[in-house]
């Protein structure tokens, strides 16, 4: 390992004043000091948001983290990581992201160099034991059996056995061994628990779970970062260290860009090229030199062809392992390439079935093609979660060489559900009135109408969508230095880059000036963030002749529709993410929002003429309690975003209570636009909550927040409006989404 990893005692770096402060907050009631602190936090909601300014120091800090990790990963750790990557690329990429998160977190906690090095190496190699797991289990696309799960549970022990041959550092080995140990577990009575667990293990378990939740899998799409934080908070005090969960949540809130995959990719490239003066310095990792220019050109044409086809394309090797998965296949199946890559093809996993609804247990079109060596072509149905099955045509063809050597198969899936939509794409007059004259993409008016329609469709139970808003960095400088024609070329190139990375059903629009937007259909928060990263990277690598071969960069804000959203709120939240990206240094992607979590809304009761004299119905829905697992200060930070995106006004703050004036918008009002808006008074009372065990003892380390809300219309005439209940219901759903909580049923 590295020289900086010493064999000294592994001390807890969390400062004693921080622990004592948490101990003082363990009372079940809100103390006067806590009320004062809460009042100060709520009073801060009235402060104006700081102007977005460039912070060049952020990039320097990122480079410092990456350079430090570059030092730590040298030596045997590099070879072990290469071995893990040769076994399973997805696991190695996950370990790399977790190591980057732990490195940034260790710096935030102010750990000593030896402690940081140990935690970083442990994070990089915590899944090393998967080298000893059989491929039939590691690459299985479906759910594991009990026996297979027990085999996977041996990863930590196997990893320690491998590491034991390289190092005698007991604290490093303990960190890896207990990386998956629960903070308070009933099963591991013989092992360490609570604060007795190594600090690195407690940090590693949180970073590991967060990355797993925010990464695509075959059986589950990636969660948004805010939903992942909510799940971590729910496991606080049982699976995870509650103090570290709070600190990790604050780090993600303050600097979300440090967890982006693009940083990990840069680190991996440095890892590949940094051979130093070692014994293996003569070994080259660049195989492109041995490839002829003609073959390299054909590879580029193949990538362009496969990427732009509207049909789903997948490649598998001779054993049925998926090696390629294009964007159209991802759109048709709702399974991302990251989640399915390296898995064995299975009709059950892809959700393919025969049209006669038959479902054979071992049926598989790829296995049939590999076994018989013949082409398979048949109509089938593809099931999608929460939607009706779509008719598809599946063609599986074997790929053979000159000597009839089999290399694998090519799978082509054609969506047959939209063959009658050609007329919508040839309306010339409509395009002239909805297109931007300079860039040729849609204009603001068309975007506004499509965003409103998308929000209304999703609120009615339709598929979710995400919004990406982007802005060219320092565009005024481009015009001032190179002239307005150069600025026009930059705008045209930016619009072209966005269109090249769009999919069927997406909307690319110019909102005004150098600001562009992209509505991503059937796309969640995590997927939209990845797409924004790809666009950002493509833009900074595209030279412009009008700028002397230089390239422009852009900042991106990403969000997904969430319960209670209107077109105005989702646009405001995306714009707030864009401002945060600029404030954090520009040329980066920031994601905000918990994502779309479908909820069941009860229909408002129809009112008769006698309902004009009733007042109980409105009061029942206007007073409720929301319980969120995040601490008070983080809940208030989320509430700040709610206020900004809804353009709410803070009327007054009194101790632990804040009163807001909110212009609620709903989509079920009358035919007039004014019937969709009702001004509401929302009084929110915040209090700290404790978690109790079965014996009734409070957990002093778990911190949650209870929000008691009373919502009523300000104008008397709105009390009789048929849109009152829908507006309040939508406001409740939006408030829940922002503060990541759930309504306590007894309060309704």
Image (cartoon, rainbow, N blue to C red):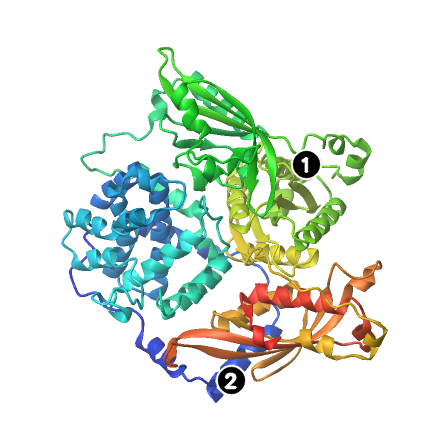
SS class of the residue under badge 1?
Answer: helix
As displayed, is residue 176 above or below residue 414? below
Give how far across and how far down residue 618 sits, in percent.
73, 75
- Mark 2, Cα crowd under 10 Å, few <14 / some 14-19 / many 20+, is some
Question: Is there any visible trace of residue 647 in the rendered image?
Answer: no
SS class of the residue under badge 2?
Answer: helix
Of callouts 1 and 2, which one flags the residue occurring earlier in the amino acid sequence? 2
**Residue under circle 1?**
485
Count how many numbered circles sit on residues in the image.
2
Give how far across and how far down residue 206 sits, in percent.
37, 60
Numbered disc in front, either 1 or 2: 2
Left or right: 11, with 492 as reference point: left
As displayed, is residue 275 above or below residue 716? above
Question: Is there any visible trace of residue 301 in the rendered image?
Answer: yes
Residue found 72% across the figure and 37% down from its top: 438
Q: Quadrant of residue 520?
A: top right
Q: Please state which of residues 89 and 730 is positioned toward the viewer in this rendering.
A: 730
Q: Quadrant of residue 43?
A: bottom right
Residue found 73% across the figure and 79% down from its top: 616
- As measured in the structure, the alpha-carbon distance from the residue carrying label 1 to the one carrying label 2 is 58 Å
Residue found 42% across the figure and 37% down from its top: 341
**Residue under circle 2?**
35
- Mark 1, Cα crowd under 10 Å, few <14 / some 14-19 / many 20+, is few
Toward the top, the furthest residue is: 402
Give how far across and how far down residue 11 sits, in percent.
23, 68
Residue found 20% across the figure and 37% down from its top: 278
Q: Please state which of residues 288 and 487 is positioned toward the viewer in this rendering.
A: 288
Q: Please state which of residues 307 and 513 is positioned toward the viewer in this rendering.
A: 307
Left or right: 682, with 581 as reference point: right
């Amino acid at each position: 390992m590295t020289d900086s990893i010493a064999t000294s005692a592994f001390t807890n770096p969390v400062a004693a004043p921080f622990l004592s402060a948490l101990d003082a907050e363990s009372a079940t009631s809100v103390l006067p000091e806590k009320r004062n602190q809460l009042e100060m936090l709520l009073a801060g909601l009235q402060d104006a948001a700081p102007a977005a300014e460039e912070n060049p120091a952020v990039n320097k800090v990122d480079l410092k983290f990456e350079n430090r990790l570059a030092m730590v990963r040298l030596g045997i750790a590099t070879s072990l990581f290469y071995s893990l990557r040769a076994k399973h690329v997805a696991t190695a990429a996950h370990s790399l992201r977790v190591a980057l998160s732990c490195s940034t977190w260790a710096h935030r906690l102010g750990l000593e160099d030896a402690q940081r090095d140990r935690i970083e190496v442990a994070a990089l190699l915590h899944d090393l034991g998967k080298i000893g797991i059989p491929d039939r289990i590691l690459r299985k696309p479906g759910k594991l059996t009990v026996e297979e799960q027990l085999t996977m549970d041996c990863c930590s022990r196997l990893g320690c056995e491998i590491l034991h041959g390289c190092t005698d550092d007991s604290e490093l080995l303990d960190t890896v061994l207990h990386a998956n140990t629960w903070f308070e577990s009933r099963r591991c009575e013989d092992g360490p628990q609570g604060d007795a667990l190594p600090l690195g293990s407690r940090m590693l378990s949180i970073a590991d779970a967060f990355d797993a939740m925010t990464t695509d899998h075959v059986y589950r799409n990636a969660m948004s970062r805010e939903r992942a934080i909510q799940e971590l908070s729910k496991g606080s005090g049982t699976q995870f260290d509650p103090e570290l969960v709070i600190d990790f949540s604050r780090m993600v809130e303050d600097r979300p860009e440090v967890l982006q995959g693009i940083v990990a990719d840069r680190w991996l490239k440095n890892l590949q090229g940094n051979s130093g003066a070692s014994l293996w310095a003569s070994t080259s990792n660049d195989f492109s030199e041995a490839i002829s220019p003609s073959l390299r050109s054909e590879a580029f044409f193949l990538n362009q062809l496969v990427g732009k086809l509207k049909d789903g394309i997948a490649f598998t090797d001779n054993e049925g392992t998926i090696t390629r998965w294009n964007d159209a296949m991802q759109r048709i199946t709702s399974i991302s390439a990251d989640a399915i890559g390296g898995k064995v093809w299975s009709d059950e996993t892809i959700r393919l079935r025969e049209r006669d609804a038959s479902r054979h247990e071992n049926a598989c079109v790829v296995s049939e093609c590999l076994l018989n060596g013949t082409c398979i072509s048949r109509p089938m149905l593809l099931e999608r979660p929460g939607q009706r099955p779509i008719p598809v045509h599946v063609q599986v063809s074997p790929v053979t060489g000159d000597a009839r050597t089999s290399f694998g198969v090519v799978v082509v899936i054609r969506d047959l559900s939209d063959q009658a939509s050609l007329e919508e794409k040839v309306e010339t007059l409509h395009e002239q009135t909805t297109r931007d004259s300079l860039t040729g993409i849609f204009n603001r008016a068309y975007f506004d109408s499509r965003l409103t329609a998308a929000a209304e469709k999703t609120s009615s139970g339709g598929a979710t969508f995400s919004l990406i808003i982007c802005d060219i960095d320092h565009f005024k400088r481009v015009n001032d230095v190179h002239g307005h024609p150069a600025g026009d070329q930059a705008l045209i190139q930016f619009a072209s880059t966005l269109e090249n990375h769009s999919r069927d059903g997406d909307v690319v629009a110019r909102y005004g000036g150098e600001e562009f937007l992209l509505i991503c259909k059937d796309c969640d928060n995590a997927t939209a963030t990845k797409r924004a990263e790809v666009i950002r990277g493509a833009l900074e690598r595209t030279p412009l002749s009008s700028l002397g071969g230089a390239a422009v960069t852009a900042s991106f804000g990403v969000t997904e529709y969430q319960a209670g959203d209107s077109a105005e709120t989702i646009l405001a939240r995306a714009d707030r993410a864009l401002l945060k990206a600029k404030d954090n240094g520009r040329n980066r992607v920031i994601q905000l929002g918990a994502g779309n979590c479908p909820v069941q809304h009860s229909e408002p009761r129809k009112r008769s003429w006698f309902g004009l004299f009733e007042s109980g119905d409105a009061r029942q829905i206007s007073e409720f309690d929301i319980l969120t697992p995040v601490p008070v200060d983080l809940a208030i930070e989320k509430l700040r975003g709610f206020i900004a995106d809804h353009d709410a006004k803070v009327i007054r703050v009194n101790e632990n209570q804040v009163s807001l004036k909110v212009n609620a918008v709903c989509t079920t009002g009358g035919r007039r636009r004014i019937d969709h808006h009702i001004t509401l008074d929302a009084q929110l009372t915040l209090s700290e909550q404790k978690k109790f065990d079965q014996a009734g003892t409070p957990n002093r380390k778990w911190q949650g927040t209870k929000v008691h809300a009373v919502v009523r219309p300000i104008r008397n005439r709105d009390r009789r409006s048929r849109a009152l209940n829908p507006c309040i219901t939508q406001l409740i759903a939006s408030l829940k989404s922002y503060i990541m909580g759930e309504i306590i049923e007894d309060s309704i």
